[in-house]
Amino acid sequence: MIGAAVAERLRPHHSLYTLGRQANLVDGVVDLSDPAQLAALKLPASDCLVHCAGVIDEDFKTDPMAAYRRATLGAEALLNAAAKSGSRRSIYISSTHVYGAQTGTKSEDSSADPQSHYALAHFCTEQIFRRHAGGGQGSFAVLRPNAVYGLPAHPESFQRWSLIPFSFPREAKGDGRITLKSSGLQKRNFVSTAAIADIVARCVDGDLAEASGVINVLGTETESVYEFAQRCRKIAEEKLGRSCTVERPQSFLSSPNAGAGSDFSIVSRFRQQRPADELNDFIRRFITLC
C-alpha cells in the first residue's frame, strides 16, 4: 500500500525500477526472505533505494523466523545490491512503534524501546540502514509514521484489514456497528500514504535530500481511538443514510490502565503540512469502495 503511493508520487519526476513478489505489479521479482537471491540481483544504475516492504504483525503470526530474515538479512542483501548499482542514498519506511509504548510525546530525539517482534524487526532494519551508511556507503533516512491509512492499491493481497483505519469504516458499512476492543482513550496520529510519499520525495531530491537519521511523518489528525470511531460513524451515517453505533464495554473504562496512551502525540523538527480534510476524505472513499 505504501510502496504503491510512493511509486505514484515519484514516477512523474524520476525513472523507477520497482521490486516485489508479484510479477504483474513490479519490474523485478524478489523475495526478501531469500538473501541469496538478492545477493545475485543485478539492478539497473540507480541513485537511491526506497524500502517500503517492512514486515507486519501478521508475518510474525505465520512464520516469525521468516519475518526476521526478511527484515534483517533480506534488507542487508537489498542494500548491498543497490550499492552495487551505484545507489548512495537509502530511505526506509519504519514505524513509531520503535519508540515503544505509545504514550507521551515522541520526537526524533526520543529513545527507541521496541516492545514487540514487529517493533524489534523494524528497529533492526533501521540499524542495518544506519550501519550501511556509516560504512561510507552513502546517506540514509528512516521515516516513522504512526497509524497509516490509504486506499489499498491491490485489495486482493492486502493483509491489514484489522487495523482501525480500515476495520472501523468497514464495520460501519457492513454491520452498522463499530466495536472497540479497548477503552478507546489511547490516541493515534493518523498518517496518509500520501504524506509518507511526500516526505520520501523530499528526501530523494527535495529540501530533505541531505537529512540523515529519523524523521517522524505527521498526519493532520491526532485523536483517540474512540474519537476516530465516532468520526467513522458520523461519515458512514451521512453517506449510507442509516444509523450506526459505536460500542465499547464499560469494563474497559473502569480498568486501571484505561487511560494509557491518552497523552500520546508525535512531533517533528521537520516542517510538514497536510490538507485539513484528508482523513475524512479517505473514510468517505473507503466506505464507498469497501
Image (spheres, helix red, strand yellow):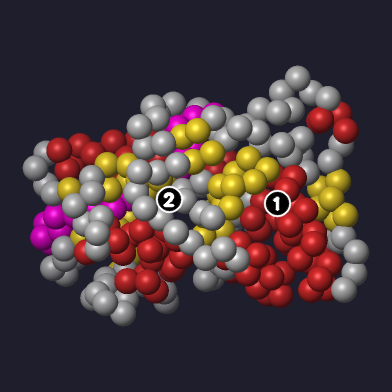
Left or right: where does residue 93 sit relative to residue 90? right
Find the residue positioned furthest to the right: 243
Residue 34 appears in the picture as rendered: no
Residue 28, horizontal then vertical, whole percent: 30, 69
* 95 falls in the magenta region: yes
Q: Residues within 10 Å of mark 1 (few under 14, many from 20)?
A: many
Locate residue 247 relative to residue 28 in the image: left or right: right
Magenta span covers which residues?
A: 80-101
Q: Is residue 175 magenta?
A: no
Viewport quadrant of the C terminus: bottom right
In the image, residue 272 above or below residue 261: below
Q: Position of residue 188 (x, y in %)?
A: 60, 44
**For the point 23% across and 45% down, which residue is it?**
212
The residue lying toward the viewer, choosing from 289 and 44, is 289
- 207 lies left or right of 248: left
**On screen, 289 above or below 50?**
below
Q: Secondary structure at mark 1?
A: helix
Element under label 2? loop
Find residue 268 and report its image quarter. top left
Q: Going from the N terminus, do you reach mark 2 or mark 1 first?
A: 2
Residue drawn where x is 71% and y is 75% of the image? 288
Q: Residue furthest bottom?
A: 12
Which residue occupies 70% across, 51% down? 228
Q: Is residue 5 visible?
A: yes
Give percent across and percent down for residue 171: 78, 59
Q: Give the CA distance from mark 2 to mark 1.
A: 19 Å
Sort mark 2 into few (<14), some (14-19) or many (20+) by Cα contacts within 10 Å.
many
Which amino acid lies under the numbered mark 2 shown in the image of this protein?
A: Val
Image vertical order of residue 16 relative to residue 206, above or below: below
- Which residue is denoted by mark 2 in the rendering? 217
User: Where does label 1 land, which residue?
Assistant: 228
- Residue 124 lies, in percent from the top left, at 34, 35
